[in-house]
């Protein structure tokens, strides 16, 4: 039997070796158009970056070794030009001599792989514009970097190869910009999981340009132009825009191909011709989870297909290929992302409905036992169908990500369920895992969802309709001091049962804690007492991860207690310290310009590695309370939110963050305890002095209760506070609606007061527009536009103003007339009369009546 294999890298070389091991007599001819065979293409980015030092290490085998070991006739630099299945012939061109000849075959295997997508561009021929697909590609990139010492690089495409190049180019010291037309990196991931990778890239200094596609490259390769009208100057460009199957040979021969051009194969990897088989990137085969077919270009499946096809080609007992579920892993800048099976968005694209056809379990466990040093948090999402069968999973974290996804991938392959994940017996010792592994935890959560014990609300679901819920924060006071979701009602979990009478049973509550566990406990308490309740999946950490980044023009979500909005900053014409990205804050480098001087005197160490929020901040608060003035605390933490939290906590408590450094998933921060002298002094009336404001003060009287006018008032207030002014806001008559609680407290009222209370809007979320309100439709439209444009809501502006120290005062006389009690006002509102307002006016250099 004569077998011709076209393509000799992954699947082709594996097939040749397997065929020879099964049949010593078969004639095997291996044809490849390239010079190199059987090499590790996945290692090319790491060779460019220097992680793989020896070029020879990339080669699994050589032409000579294949010929000697497996008695294969290897013809490199030979191009397969035409296939005639009817005659069972292959036309080949020798690229060394230009000789064209024909070979007959009994069976033929196509392992032609794929090629990078390269659009027609002006600067495509420039010597600093590259693709990375073959060994010669890697040689060109490495040679350019070593000869030209580029300082800046643009990577176009944020897929696996693109991000691996980002990792390796930054390892070489280059400044990197990533461009991708999609709104996220790593298309196989759901947006919320991809966001974790994006946040990490931005924190490490990557210029991320998402949603902007490549338009052109200048002729000299020195500028990349984007379709949003912007451009990026650069010293080199790496194109990583995806792959297309090398299926021209099959298509021209009349073999069946899929919609995207991949060669269709059956379980034995046979094409539409019984004597022609195909393996690797060029194929489209069975999707084993939900059925149907799909194409997955990965090295692992290509090698497994190369082994599986051998038996069928030789006519032996078939070894059916069971399909590819699509399991991948990526490391980028010390962060690992991995996935397997179906994602949320892929299921929805296939017409499946969240909450009906499939469910999601989202958890933030530690990589190993928290009490053992070095534990770090990871985020794990598992998707199951309505019967509990596992459909897919995704994970992002510093360590332990790969083995969790591998475990779930094996479970999927075996048709496993949420029950299986919950009950898997996995290896445990403190350095490696926890007694309840993250996979077990995700399985338990999925079980509870399926059993109806919890109703998880994903971040995107909440953001789509935030007015449908009242947020209930059940974290501890120390956690809330660091930050909270604006507009939340705060009742610590330990006090929840005793304070249920403060909650309105007619109001649906969306509960959240740090990562979800306490939120679930609170949800069970509330539902057990007849309340409508759900749990915000992933808790406050997910809110911090998914809120707007600085590079998107939004506020730093995780610093909710101190940040101001973009609208307020632009109104004031300045940016605030609170909106600064903690990763680029001057304190991150104690030796850098603007850094706080290094601590003098005693420095006490504190190791909170392995603890998750709120543990690190609580321990810091306790430790700092025991320090003498001027002493410092050096704390090391692995909680991913700690770098942001510690900056917010230090500012809130009046202590000094001397330095902060994040490396390999560990944050080291030095905090100096400062005395009361560093705090603003108190005036006899209990108010803070203007202090640093230099006497500048603003007073805003809010008379109106319309949404648009309230927005204007709080934009001005936030802007003034951002400029360092002291701001007073006095709410009277209809303006009282702006600062009412959305929930209805139980307060005794007479008939007139009850009538007023029912007719007045209950809180900022229910205000209408002064014009074009259209029965509330106009207000709803404005809120949708604000969300789409990334503009802070009124509720967020109010919370931001309070966090910035804006003083909110309700008019006592107006409250009496309109039957509003203090219990109906949001937290932090003072009550005063006209004398208070006039006193504020006298001190102010600007007074507004809105």
Image (spheres, helix red, strand yellow):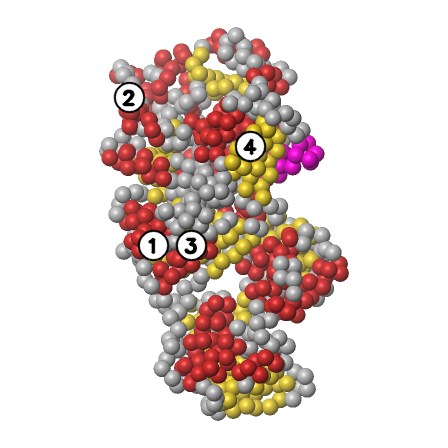
* Cα separation between marks 4 and 1: 37 Å
* Cα separation between marks 1 and 3: 13 Å
Task: Tell me the residue at 30%/25% (across/down).
Answer: 499
Mark 3 = which residue?
404
Task: Tell me the residue at 45%/72% (across/down).
Answer: 304
> Circles 1 and 2: CB distance less than 8 Å?
no
Dot label at residue 125: none
State the SS at label 1: loop
Neighbour class for label 4 at 10 Å: few (<14), some, many (≥20)?
few
Vertical placement of residue 354 versus 118, above or below: above
Marked residue nearer the N-terminal end (2 or 4): 4
Measured from the top left, where is residue 714 in percent x and y?
51, 26
Measured from the top left, where is residue 283 in percent x and y?
46, 73
* Cα separation between marks 4 and 3: 33 Å
What is the residue that sits farthest to the right in this orientation? 147
Mark 1 = which residue?
425
Measured from the top left, where is residue 432 in percent x and y?
44, 50
* The magenta stretch spans residue 834: no
Marked residue nearer the N-terminal end (4 or 1): 1
Neighbour class for label 2 at 10 Å: few (<14), some, many (≥20)?
few
Mark 2 = which residue?
746
State the SS at label 2: loop
Return the residue nearer the eye: 54 or 771: 54
């Amino acid at each position: 039997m004569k077998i011709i294999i076209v393509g000799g890298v992954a699947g082709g070389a594996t097939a040749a070796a397997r065929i020879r091991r099964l049949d010593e007599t078969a004639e095997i001819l291996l044809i490849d158009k390239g010079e190199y065979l059987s090499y590790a293409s996945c290692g090319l980015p790491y060779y460019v970056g220097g992680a793989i030092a020896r070029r020879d290490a990339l080669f699994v085998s050589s032409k000579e070794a294949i010929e000697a070991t497996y008695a294969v006739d290897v013809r490199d630099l030979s191009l397969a030009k035409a296939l005639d299945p009817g005659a069972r012939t292959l036309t080949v061109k020798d690229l060394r001599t230009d000789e064209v000849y024909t070979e007959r075959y009994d069976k033929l295997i196509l392992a032609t792989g794929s090629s990078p997508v390269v659009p027609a561009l002006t600067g495509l021929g420039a010597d600093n514009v590259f693709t990375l697909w073959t060994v010669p590609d890697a040689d060109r990139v490495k040679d350019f970097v070593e000869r030209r010492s580029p300082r800046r690089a643009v990577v176009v495409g944020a897929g696996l190869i693109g991000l691996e190049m980002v990792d390796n180019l930054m390892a070489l010291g280059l400044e990197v910009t990533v461009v991708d037309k999609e709104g996220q990196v790593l298309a196989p991931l759901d947006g919320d999981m991809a966001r974790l990778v994006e946040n990490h890239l931005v924190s490490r200094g990557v210029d991320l340009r998402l949603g902007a596609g490549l338009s052109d490259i200048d002729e000299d390769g020195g500028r990349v132009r984007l379709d949003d009208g912007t451009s990026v100057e650069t010293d080199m460009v790496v194109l990583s825009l995806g792959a297309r199957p090398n299926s021209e040979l099959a298509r021209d021969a009349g073999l069946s191909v899929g919609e995207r051009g991949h060669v269709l194969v059956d379980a034995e990897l046979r094409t539409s011709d019984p004597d022609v088989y195909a393996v690797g990137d060029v194929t489209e085969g069975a999707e084993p989870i939900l059925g149907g077919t799909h194409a997955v270009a990965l090295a692992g499946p290509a090698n497994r297909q190369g082994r599986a096809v051998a038996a069928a080609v030789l006519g032996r007992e078939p070894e059916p290929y069971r399909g590819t579920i699509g399991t991948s892993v990526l490391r980028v800048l010390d962060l690992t992302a991995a996935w397997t099976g179906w994602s949320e968005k892929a299921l929805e694209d296939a017409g499946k409905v969240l909450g009906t056809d499939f469910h999601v379990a989202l958890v933030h466990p530690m990589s190993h036992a928290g009490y053992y040093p070095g534990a770090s948090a990871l985020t794990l999402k598992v998707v199951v169908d309505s019967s509990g069968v596992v459909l897919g999973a995704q994970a992002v974290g510093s360590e332990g990500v790969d083995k969790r996804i591998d475990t779930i991938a094996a479970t999927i392959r075996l048709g496993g369920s949420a029950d299986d994940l919950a009950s898997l017996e996995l290896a445990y010792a403190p350095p490696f895992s926890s007694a309840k592994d993250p996979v077990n935890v995700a399985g338990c959560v999925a079980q509870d969802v399926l059993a109806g014990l919890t109703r998880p609300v994903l971040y995107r679901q909440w953001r789509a309709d935030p007015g449908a819920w009242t947020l209930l924060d059940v974290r501890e006071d120390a956690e809330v001091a660091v930050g909270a979701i604006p507009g939340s009602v705060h009742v610590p979990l330990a006090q929840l049962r005793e304070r249920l009478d403060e909650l309105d049973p007619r109001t649906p509550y969306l509960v959240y804690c740090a990562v979800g566990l306490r939120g679930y406990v609170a949800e069970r308490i509330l539902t057990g007492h007849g309340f409508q309740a759900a749990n915000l999946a992933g808790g406050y950490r997910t809110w911090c991860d998914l809120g707007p980044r600085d590079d998107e023009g939004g506020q730093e979500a995780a610093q909710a207690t101190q940040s101001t909005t973009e609208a307020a900053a632009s109104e004031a014409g300045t940016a605030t310290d609170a909106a600064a990205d903690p990763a680029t804050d001057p304190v991150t480098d104690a030796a850098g310009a603007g850094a706080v001087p290094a601590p003098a005197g005693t420095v006490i160490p504190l190791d909170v590695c392995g603890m998750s929020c709120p543990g690190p901040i609580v321990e810091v608060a306790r430790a700092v309370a025991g320090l003498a003035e001027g002493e410092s605390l050096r704390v090391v933490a692995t909680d991913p939110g700690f770098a942001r939290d510690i900056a917010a906590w230090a500012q809130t408590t009046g202590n000094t963050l001397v330095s902060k450094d994040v490396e390999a998933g560990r944050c080291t921060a030095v905090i100096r305890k400062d005395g009361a002298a560093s705090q603003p002094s108190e005036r006899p009336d209990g108010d803070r002095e203007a202090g640093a404001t230099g006497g500048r003060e603003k007073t805003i009287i809010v008379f109106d209760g319309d949404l648009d006018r309230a927005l204007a008032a709080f934009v001005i207030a936030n802007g003034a506070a951002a400029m360092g002014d002291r701001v007073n806001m006095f709410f009277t008559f209809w303006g009282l609606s702006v600062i009412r609680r959305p929930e209805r407290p139980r307060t005794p009222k007479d008939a007139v007061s009850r009538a007023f209370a029912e007719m007045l809007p209950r809180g900022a979320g229910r205000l209408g527009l002064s014009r074009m309100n259209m029965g509330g439709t106009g207000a709803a439209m404005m809120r949708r536009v604000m969300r789409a444009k990334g503009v802070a809501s009124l509720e967020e502006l109010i919370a931001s103003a309070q966090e910035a120290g804006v003083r909110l005062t309700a008019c006592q006389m107006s409250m009496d007339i309109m039957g509003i009690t203090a219990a109906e006002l949001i937290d932090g509102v003072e009550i005063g009369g006209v004398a208070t307002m006039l006193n504020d006016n006298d001190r102010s250099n600007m007074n507004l009546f809105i």
